[in-house]
Image (cartoon, helix red, strand yellow):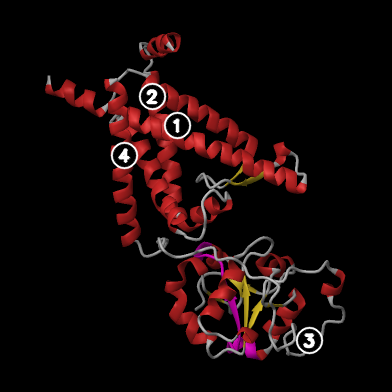
Amino acid sequence: MHVVIRTIAEFISISILALILAFAANAVRTKGSIDLYKVYFPPIRSGETAVEEPTRPSVPISVKEDPSEKDPPKKDFGFQTVTLEQAVEIHNDPMAEIKVYLFVDARDDKHYEAGHISGAIQADHYQLDLYLDNLMQYAEAAEKIIVYCNGGNCEDSIYMCQDLEGMGIAKKKIYLFDGGWEAWTKNNMPIETGRSE
Amino acid sequence: MSDSKSNFRRLDEFEIPFPFIVRLFLGGHFVYMGVNKIIGSIEFLKQINLYEMLPSDPPHFLNATAIVLPWMEVLCGMALILGVWIRGGATQIAILLCVFTPAIFLRALAIHNADGTPFLDIEFDCGCGGGPVIIWKKLLSNTGLFLLAWFALFSQSRRLTVAKLLQDRAK
């Protein structure tokens, strides 16, 4: 009986110590800190791409064949999407160089620094406070904002689109590049490593 | 129970300090995994969300779990390594393994049912702190870790513990 009580006491002691240490460390760390009250995984709104603009960007696109016509119907995340060809076209436009057409990388530091679409700025949905000033500085002035993450099942770019909309950026300016990093690198498109901002 | 206790005692009395080796291995493993989770806290948060065991809205439970769990692992690991609060640490490790091992199994089963991937080929990052893993191997290793935690819990040996070392020094 004595052993059982002692085990329970030890168990509780470790739990209390872990609670104190965990919240203290979380409070003092600058990167990787988790906000207890933040909804990091908001429900992804779908089927409401109710924007006045056409689903395609208005830059002239010289793609002969629209691959989206061949592909199965894509999921509607409530934002306009761009295909790889359209993303390349926007990227090649001189407006992209001066960030009027802005590429936003919604992945974390490790992935962004390992490689990102050249000229893209980083804005991690999970650490938004750290990127907010830089993001807003460019996003408010931009005419088109192309948001991407890894591609595939990655949802971070969708969360970032929702963040941008929540920050008052007009929805018609926001484009989701759902092929993302995977599609970009598979086709040997220009990339940068490190931090270019 | 008495049989298993006597087996534990036999192992305790071996020349080679088995209980110490078990504590060191198990403790080291959990410290390593816990530290990885603390460093990659956001990645860990994303991973535990994928289990859908806790609601993401309201977020308090999910976020608190991502904050506290890695520290719990580190402290349990440290307890085992140092030989302080061994039973408490071992119990907590056993409970964590009892919760997360079936969760990993169920997630793998869901993948198997969804896209027909052979169960033995299923690989994903289980949020355990070691990156993507082949799931059947993870399930096997977790079972092994559970048995080691069980052994640490019932072992009565206090060789090479901080308390024992201090006691010997005082003498």
Q: Alpha carbon of mark 2 to alpha carbon of mark 4: how far?
A: 15 Å
Magenta stretch encompasses residue A103: yes
Pointer 3 residue: A61
**Gap between marks 3 and 2 measured at Cα:** 67 Å
Whether residue A63 is visible to the viewer of this picture, yes or no, is yes
Stretch of the chain drawn in magenta: A95-110
Residue pictured at 38% horizontal, 28% vertical: B23
Spatial CA span between label 3 and label 1: 59 Å
- In the displayed orientation, state which residue is furthest to the left: B171
| Chain assignment, label 1 | B
Q: Which of A192 and B97 is in front in this view?
A: B97
- The residue under label 1 is B94
Q: What element carries label 1?
A: helix
Label 4 neighbourhood size at 10 Å, few (<14), some (14-19), many (20+)? many
Above/below status of A36 relative to B113: below
Determine if marks 4 and 1 fall on one subunit. Answer: no
The amino acid sitting under disc 3 is: Ile
- Residue A72 relative to residue B158: left or right: right
Identified by mark 1, the residue type is: Ala
Mark 4: secondary structure:
helix
Residue drawn 77% across the image and 77% down it:
A85
Which residue is labeled 2 in the image?
A: B153
- Amino acid on which disc 2 is placed: Leu
Q: Which residue is drawn at 62% across and 83% down?
A: A171
